[in-house]
Image: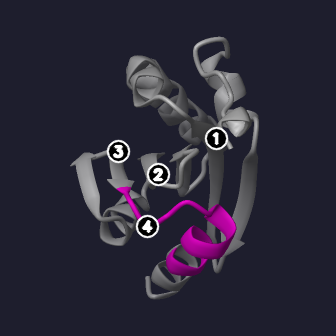
Amino acid sequence: MLGASVSLRDSSMHDILNRDLKSYEVGNYRFAIGQTNYSRMEEVQKILPEFKETLKAEQEKLKLDLLVMLFTDVMGDGSLFVFYGPLSNVIHDMIETTFDDHSGFDSKIISRKQQMMPKLSALIKTI
C-alpha cells in the first residue's frame, strides 16, 4: 500500500491537483474533486500554503461552484480536505473537522466515489 503513495515534493502544485481530477454536475452546480495519496503528513503540510493558492486560482479560472482536493492517507486513516468555491460551506457541513475556511480532515472518508460523492451529492441537492 505504501507504494501507492505519490511523491508530493517532486510534483508541481498543478500536477498534484490535475493528476486525478474528476468533474461533476449535480443540478445546476459544477464542481471537481481531485485525490492523491500520501504516506507522510509532513509532506502535505510543507506544500499546503502553495497548494491552497493554486487550488483557489484554478477554482476561479474554471468558474466552478466547488473545487476539492483530498489528500488521503495510504494506511486508510482518513483524508485531508482542501477546498474553494461558493459551495465551501457544504464541505464544512460534511467533514468531521475544519481547520480554517478552506481545509479540514475526516477520518472516515478515504474514497471519493463510495464515501464522498454520495454525501456531497445529497447535501448539494438540498440547496
Tell whether label 4 touches label 3 (CB within 8 Å).
Answer: no
Residue type (three-letter) at the residue carrying disc 1: Thr
| Residue at x-position 65% and y-position 54% | 32
Q: Earlier in the sequence, mark 4 or mark 1?
A: 1
Magenta run includes residue 111 = yes
Gap between marks 4 and 1, in whole Å?
Answer: 16 Å
- On screen, residue 48 versus residue 62, left or right, reads left
The residue beneath circle 3 is 103
Residue type (three-letter) at the residue carrying disc 2: Ser
Gap between marks 2 and 4, in whole Å?
Answer: 8 Å
| Residue 79 - label | 2
Magenta run includes residue 120 = no
Could you tell me which quadrant the C terminus lies in? bottom left
Q: Nearer the viewer, mark 1 or mark 3?
A: 1
Gap between marks 1 and 3, in whole Å?
Answer: 15 Å
State whether residue 73 appears in this view.
Answer: yes
Gap between marks 3 and 4, in whole Å?
Answer: 16 Å
Give the SS element for disc 4. Answer: loop
The residue beneath circle 1 is 36
